[in-house]
Amino acid sequence: MFRIPPLVVLLNLCFVSFAQTQIVKLNIGDQSRPQDEIYLELVSRFQHNNSRPNHSNDKYDRSIYSPKSVKFSADGKKFYIQSLEGYNTSVYRSDSLKRIKVIRHSFGQEHNRLFKNNENTIFGYKYYGAPQNKNYFKGKPVESCLSHNGKYLWVSYYRRNYDKNAVSPSAVAIIDTEYDSIVRVMPTGPLPKMLAASHNNKFLAVTHWGDNTVGIIDISSDDVMDFKYIAHSVIDFQSKNNFNEPVNRDQNCSNCLRGTLFTPDNKYLLIGKMGGNGIAVVSVGDFKYQGTIVGIKRNVRHLIQDDNILYISTNKTGYVQKTDLNIMLDSFNRSPSKVNFLYKNWTSSYVGTGVRTIAKTNYKNYVFAAVNNSSELVILDAKSLSIIGKMKADSYPVGMAISPDDKYLIVTSQGRRSAGGNSVMVFEIKENTK
């Protein structure tokens, strides 16, 4: 552990006071400290807050509006930014770092073909206060995942624009990454966030933040019109969404299901309970909820895996943790009681409250964490989880992704209460050769 001298923190950074909140804005060329092993350098940015930037690589981009997440294509040639309030997905080339397309998540009569048999709901979900044609809407993109070896990019919608309380069925768009166009839209339950495809490309999970459930889609066909829901997994209980007045759905979400992944052997689906406690375990095949693994720091947000190592972030408590996935699941399976199975074999590192997305390099042993509260990026050694570097980020970082060749780390800063944000930072991951 180390402390960064105040002068180093302030070097080359611009701080702007906004409603008693210290807003951070980096300059192109800013670097992380220290630089003992690897370090980050801001080499480019796409932002919607300064129409007259001082650097040619600081690019004013109107399509960036509350950017929530980022995903690289399977070959690394492109990356996709989901802008929640912009109702769009922006597409950029990795080699030139130039925007090549904006995919609009807005649907009217001319898009009827995207909705198979005009489907607009699943599992008996009802609409509240919706227009006559439920499929004429704008979608708020949140997260994304790839399937079919990168052919399809799935994008979840926080809600349809007319669904003010996010209590009605939302939707997920399927984008053909060759043409970067939407080829189908499928309904979901209320407030879907995380998406995860199984490693054998048979199933896709849609995690509903809105009511403690997960929708399972059969994606075994190569034809998007053959995809269909086959299961509806309930975690603990299905919460009711009978809100008759405006409500904060970031807080009123019961278990607030978030991080989601299939285990490498495709036997289990793991879901983080951000509003509850622990990691829910669902068996693949029957898709039945088996129980919850506890003993983790509270407020689990993000789950990632590398080979057989599971890494998690815990938002409010501010930790990155790791464990051996096989050991954890073997212990869980041997336990006679799985309701709240206590598992303690975790390596932990405190990185700061508000840690959101985490990402691991593909060929090197480093983990990166976006710490929202302090507007900071933290670099950790993947084996020990010791902190080896830090740097400030544009306020307030949320999403991140690493290019397949480990060259770039892309970080989205969404902003908070109209302060900061609307920024997508492109960092080059550099090794110290001194």
Image: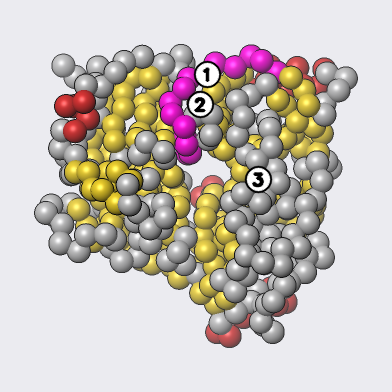
State which quarter of the image contains the C terminus: top left
Contact, mark 1 vs mark 2 (Cβ under 8 Å): yes
First along the sequence among labels 3 and 2: 3
Q: Earlier in the sequence, mark 1 or mark 2?
A: 2
Q: Quadrant of residue 308?
A: top right
Instruction: Indicate the position of residue 49 as horizontal and vertical percent values.
Output: 26, 59
Q: Secondary structure at mark 2?
A: strand
Q: Amino acid at mark 1?
A: Ser
Judged left or right of residue 111, residue 404 is left
Where residue 310 appears, as percent x and y from the top left, is 58, 26
**Residue 55 seen in this snapshot:** yes
Rendered-image quadrant of the N terminus: top left
Q: Count the marks.
A: 3
- Whether residues under marks 1 and 3 lie with C-beta atoms below 8 angstroms apart, the answer is no
Residue, disc 2: 319
Which residue does the image show at 37% across and 29% down from the upper left?
378
- Please, is residue 415 above or below residue 337 in the view? below
Q: Is residue 25 above or below residue 299?
A: below
Q: Residues within 10 Å of mark 3 (few under 14, many from 20)?
A: many
**Residue at the spot x=35%, y=65% of the render?**
63
From this view, report whether residue 189 is shown above or below residue 326. Answer: below
- Name the residue carrying label 1: 348
Q: Is residue 358 magenta?
A: yes
Q: Residue furthest front?
A: 20
Q: Mark 2: which amino acid?
A: Tyr
Q: The disc labelled 3 sits on which kind of residue?
A: Cys
Q: Which one is nearer the viewer's eye here, 195 or 292?
A: 292
Q: Which mark is residue 195?
A: none
Q: What residue is pinned by disc 3?
A: 256
Q: Please provide percent x and percent y for residue 184.
A: 60, 68
Residue numbers of the magenta segment: 343-363
